[in-house]
Image: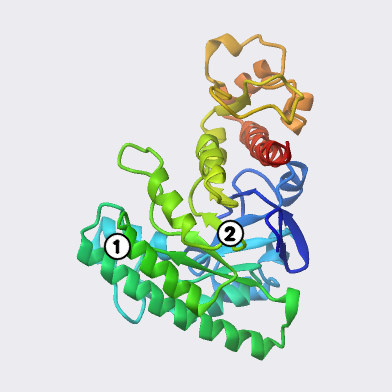
Amino acid sequence: MNKNTIRLRNQPVKLPVFMPDATLGIVRSVDAADLEDCHIQAVVMNTYHLMQRPGSTTIDSLGGLHDMCGWQRPIVTDSGGFQAYSLIQENPKFGSITEKGIHFRPEGTARKFLLTPEKCIQLQFGYGSDVIICLDQCTHVDAPLDQQQQAVERTVRWAGQCKAEYLNQLEHAKIRGDARPKLFAVIQGGGYRDLRKACAEQLLEIGFDGFGFGGWPLDKQGVLLDEILAYTRSLIPSDYPMHALGVGHPRNVVACHDLGYALFDSAMPTRDARHGRLYRYNQPDGDPGAGLMGDWMRYIYIDDKKHIKLDKPISDGCDCLCCRRYSLGFLHHLFKINDHLFYRLATMHNLRFMSQLEERLRLRAIG
């Protein structure tokens, strides 16, 4: 890997890269061909959700995630630690986190699950993931020091167990070189710099292909935790790629890219699309090298009455299917009648906006 590209199973992925969340094996409202048309290079799926639905035996029967989903480009699978933590944090009756792993029982089901570090790696390996993420213990940035210390210690121990199981899986499958999936570890520590440093140093000693920023990257007001994000990035040598897990607001992607992060994922752009919040650049249309300073983007709220008879696309500078063929007036009509075509077209537009954002960041870097 160099700073501009990472190879995942012999496929080059240009950096920076935004990866939409395909949590349950699909980016809602669009198919694999739509994603390719939007220049999406990779997607993120979630082990916590996939092990429940459709279930690991079903995924195996359908040939792994790539064949099941019809998506032959790279897939990153998150460990599911954050999702399990969120479930348990919301209501402890749904599970617990112990040294052995994460015990959980999703709401509405009597079935119990145990996600151990070894099981986490086995599942992701079996799914055919291109980037496997170690199981970690997530915390909120405002959690007290003792909880943060415990989370760091456990995250490091689990990372060591994940690495050992990863090597076992490689040996068993006889996978060598670039054909192997990459293994990423997650740096925890909340807002405590000494804990972030201790976590990063120990993970570097174990050895991984890349690293992720652990914990929710926003404060209670939804403001990016740029200081701790910057500090955490500074702890890892620049030749290792870092994933800003859960960062997907366009402005936050730019901010984190400027701090040295190269991989991003979120459900925000697609969720915004389905709710009628569409993205548009303020810079001159058709100029992919335009700067990203100041007020460089804005939202189009499709429910606004001013769009009813507007015979123009969301953006003249966008080459997505939505902007190539359909007007804001037609999109407004689809939204008001709750037709599913709106969800598809709007999702494609916001995803193309994000892939164009990647292109602009690359051009800015060489300009």
Q: Position of residue 301 (x, y in %)?
A: 53, 21
For the residue carrying disc 1, how many other residues have a C-alpha within 10 Å: few (<14), some (14-19), or many (20+)?
many
Say which element carries label 2.
loop
Q: CA distance from mark 1 to mark 2?
A: 35 Å
Q: Which residue is mark 2?
A: 238
Inspect this view and state whether residue 137 appears: yes
Q: Amino acid at mark 2?
A: Ser
Tell me what residue is drawn at x 74 percent, y 59 percent: 73
Q: Nearer the viewer, residue 238 or 144?
A: 238
Q: Specify the quadrant that holds the N terminus.
A: bottom right
Q: Quadrant of residue 335?
A: top right
Q: Which residue is mark 1?
A: 88
6 left or right of 247 in image: right
For residue 60, the mark is none
For the residue carrying disc 2, how many other residues have a C-alpha within 10 Å: few (<14), some (14-19), or many (20+)?
few
Q: Nearer the viewer, residue 147 or 26?
A: 147
Q: Position of residue 182 (x, y in %)?
A: 63, 71
Q: Nearer the viewer, residue 362 or 239?
A: 239
Q: Amino acid at mark 1?
A: Ile
Colouring scheme, one of rainbow, by chain, secondary structure, one colour:
rainbow
Tell me what residue is drawn at x 57 percent, y 9 percent: 306
Q: Earlier in the sequence, mark 1 or mark 2?
A: 1
342 up-or-down from 191: above or below = above
Tell me what residue is drawn at x 64 percent, y 23 percent: 331
Tell me what residue is drawn at x 73 percent, y 38 percent: 363
